[in-house]
Amino acid sequence: MVKICCIGAGYVGGPTMAVIAVKCPAIEVVVVDISKPRIDAWNSDTLPIYEPGLDEVVKACRGKNLFFSTDVEKHVAEADIIFVSVNTPTKTRGLGAGKAADLTYWESAARMIADVSKSDKIVVEKSTVPVKTAEAIEKILTHNSKGINYQILSNPEFLAEGTAIDDLFKPDRVLIGGRETPEGRKAVQALKEVYANWVPEENIITTNLWSAELSKLAANAFLAQRISSVNAMSALCEATGANVSEVSYAIGKDSRIGPKFLNASVGFGGSCFQKDILNLVIKINDYQKSRFVNRVVSSMFNTVSGKKVAVLGFAFKKDTGDTRETPAIDVCKGLLGDKAQVSIYDPQVTEDQIQRDLAMNKFDWDHPMHLQPTSPSSVKQVSVVWDAYEATKGAHAVCILTEWNEFKELDYQKIFNNMQKPAFVFDGRNVVNADKLREIGFIVYSIGKPLDA
Ligand code: NAD
């Protein structure tokens, strides 16, 4: 029986390994992590991450050929193929702070592999890493090798949070890069055989190592550029009376452009784009967030001081509880900086998480946002509630910051009745029917759309 071990039981490692296990009953898959609470949660009825369809997949194979463990060294030593899916955040200090990837977790995983291995291994880069990371990892492994043969493969993950299970079951493509040597080709073939259990052959692309590493970064840069381009267009729409949904639809009909990733919004978030892409794109994204806050404040007679503002949605997108780099953090900090009382509701994000995110004073003054960092006192201006109606009760304004489906279905008449007047809705995701809300009496701002008269 082939044995797979995945280091890192996060948003990528957990779902990816669950899908491999369910599709390959003849392979034993063990997901290991240094975080005991995370592993305990994977072994419980309440998984540590929310993803539609994940519960069913995990339940189908956990305890049969899918296992979660904190015994990292034992399972790494026993594995034939080791996926490394640890976090690779942006460096926060020292050389390259704010720009370069922090590969500390990767390096310590590689050193541990070198320490405990007693047989040949295929080591798969699942994390998103800078180009040439495989070369650095090879150095660590081969210089400590004790005669063991290591083959490094790059197999970047393209799943999107919120649709991870669908993306894993039916990937647009699986990309595998390896060394162009006989051993390298053999390792690529071994990993290809795993995916071939459910992915059609034509969707499995094999390349050299550097093409695979670079393709992941290039894909993220292209996707983020699309979002930032349409967001830049939304400002132009607001200035001219054009409607960004109409413009997106019209340009998306061009087969060279295509319709996906053309929704204007308050800005993109998530742990990946921010760190993987070009600085220019980030600037447009920051501008979009500060523009949104400025719109809220200027519409509300130039101040939100002492006013209750309901924030609906805090996750960086719908169908996930992930708040890393969510635009909601900067928007809330901007509102708190102008002394608003912010009442937040998100169906999947806990109060602890929100308070932690807002208390973190990691504001980057190099970026062109003119918002205040959060002070300890402003955290007291925040309340987190478990109901959209509670959040909006007595509020002057509603800001929709995540496109959860349930925000389309709310009883906006009831919300309007319980709000201060004039009642504002700032739709940062263009999810509500603005015309219907205007009929009720709301003043509505939608990203990139003509404003209320
Ligand atoms: P995550 O933070 O959710 O999970 C990483 C896990 O690795 C954590 O649970 C951590 O405890 C564990 N870990 C760190 N060092 C370890 C070690 N030495 N031994 C054992 N466990 C260790 O991260 P994630 O969102 O799953 O992302 C993982 C990688 O995949 C990143 O490089 C990310 O850029 C990339 N990626 C993420 C997504 C996404 O949508 N989240 C999509 C594609 C690629």
Image: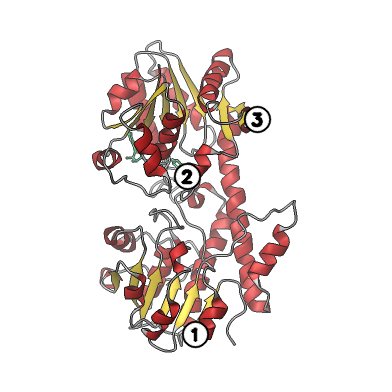
Above or below: residue 444 compared with residue 262: below
Pointer 2 residue Cβ closer than 8 Å to ligand 1: yes
Above or below: residue 100 compared with residue 30: below
Rendered image: mark on residue 201: none
Residue 278 point in image, percent of width and height: 57, 51
Labels 2 and 3: the sequence-earlier one: 2
- What is the distance, in whole Å, between disc 2 and disc 1 at their CAs? 37 Å
Q: Which residue is mark 1?
A: 440
Residue type, mark 3 in image: Glu
Q: Is residue 337 something one can see in this rendering?
A: no
Above or below: residue 178 compared with residue 363: above
Element assignment for label 2: helix
- What is the distance, in whole Å, between disc 2 and disc 3 at their CAs? 21 Å
- What is the distance, in whole Å, between disc 3 and disc 1 at their CAs? 52 Å
Residue drawn at point x = 36 percent, y = 77 percent:
392
**Disc 3 packing (10 Å; few <14; some 14–19; many ≥20):** few
Element assignment for label 3: helix
Residue type, mark 2 in image: Ala
Split into quadrants, the picture shows ligand 1 in the one at: top left
Q: Which residue is mark 2?
A: 164
Element assignment for label 1: helix
Give the mark toward the camera: 2 or 1.
1
Rendered image: mark on residue 202: 3
Labels 2 and 1: the sequence-earlier one: 2
